[in-house]
């Protein structure tokens, strides 16, 4: 365990966490990675805290059996509900992903920001604690009901998706937000459509680059950074049909279906 050439493991409630994997792969191309898509149980956002913890433990155990040296919880809902329990149970570095409220709140000129996230993330204690730090900022919270389901079904650019986004974003525009925080790792794949709806003045923030930087920092601090000059290998696993994950990855990588 914790050998430099061992892979970084990532898991999400489906294909969305590949947006995090891309950012990590961009700044750490020599690292070996294993991505686990728990699409069979997506979305996590509508599950209880206990269910989310149980699924997160199951995913972590799968990745540890693959000798992963670090686990990236590439899911906002799993991070905000389960990462404390994961860090208690397993002796391995964990990187979480949380809505990037801080940069939006610190930069807003209208004193109003929007956050689009799952019910599980918005209901979590971790999210509520984060919001308390910005009592002077108006935060428009919107649950993205149905968005993850449509992405997991391969309906990224469907009429239903456009209608939902219009419904969710219009009240935020009327409230004069100048920043939109994406609080789910699936949502970066919706940015082109979101930009068509939002005014150009509204900036969109997701956590991907910050997570990638933190991943690198922890690897360096723990002295487990892969110093190889060769490009790393990546394995993708899903417990559902590989079609949607392959499509999200532009069919550039093999995806193996596993029952886990």
Image (tube, rainbow, N blue to C red):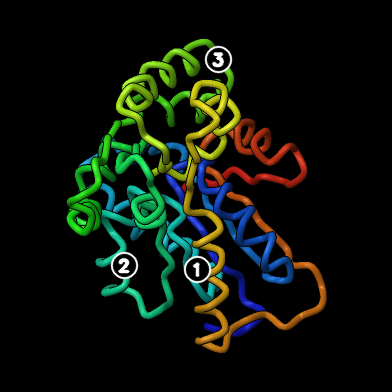
Q: Is residue 199 above or below residue 61?
A: above
Task: Indicate the secondary structure of the residue bearing disc 3.
Answer: loop
Q: CA distance from mark 3 to mark 1?
A: 38 Å
Q: Secondary structure at mark 2?
A: helix
| Depicted 69 relative to depicted 36: above or below | below
Q: Residues within 10 Å of mark 2 (few under 14, many from 20)?
A: many
Residue at x-position 31% and y-position 39%: 112
Which numbered disc, 3 or 1, marks the residue closer to the eye? 3
* Residue beneath disc 3: 158
Looking at the image, which residue is at 68% across and 70% down?
31
Disc 2 and disc 3 in contact, CB within 8 angstroms: no
Residue at the disc numbered 2: 86
Q: Residue at x 58, y 19 (%)?
A: 157
Sooner in the amino-acid sequence: mark 3 or mark 1: 1
Q: Which badge, 2 or 1, comes first in the chain's sequence?
A: 1
Asked if residue 89 can be seen in this view, the reply is yes
**Looking at the picture, how far across and down is residue 168, in whole percent?**
36, 23
**Residue matched to label 1:** 65
Check if mark 3's residue and mark 1's residue have beta carbons within 8 Å. no
Give me the C-alpha separation between circle 2 and circle 1. 15 Å
Few, some or many C-alpha atoms within 10 Å of disc 3 (few <14, some 14-19, many ≥20)? few
């Amino acid at each position: 365990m914790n050998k430099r050439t061992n892979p970084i493991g990532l898991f999400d409630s489906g294909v969305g966490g590949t947006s995090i994997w891309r950012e990590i792969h961009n700044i750490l191309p020599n690292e070996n990675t294993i991505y686990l898509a728990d699409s069979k149980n997506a979305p996590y956002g509508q599950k209880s805290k206990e269910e989310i913890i149980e699924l997160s433990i199951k995913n972590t155990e799968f990745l540890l059996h693959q000798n992963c040296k670090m686990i990236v919880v590439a899911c906002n809902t799993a991070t905000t509900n389960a990462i404390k329990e994961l860090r208690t149970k397993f002796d391995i570095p964990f990187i979480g992903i949380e809505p990037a409220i801080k940069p939006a709140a610190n930069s807003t000129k209208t004193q109003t920001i929007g956050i689009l996230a799952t019910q599980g993330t918005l209901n979590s204690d971790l999210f509520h604690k984060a919001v308390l730090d910005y009592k002077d900022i108006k935060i428009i919270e919107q649950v993205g009901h149905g968005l993850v389901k449509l992405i997991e079904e391969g309906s990224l650019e469907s009429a239903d998706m456009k209608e939902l986004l219009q419904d969710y974003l219009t009240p935020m525009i009327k409230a004069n937000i100048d920043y939109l925080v994406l609080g789910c790792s699936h949502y970066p794949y919706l940015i082109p459509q979101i930009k068509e709806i939002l005014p150009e003045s509204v900036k969109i923030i997701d956590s991907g680059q910050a997570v990638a930087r933190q991943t690198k920092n922890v690897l360096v601090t723990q002295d487990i950074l892969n110093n190889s000059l060769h490009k790393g290998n990546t394995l993708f696993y899903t417990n559902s049909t590989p079609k949607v994950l392959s499509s999200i990855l532009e069919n550039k990588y093999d995806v193996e279906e596993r029952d886990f």
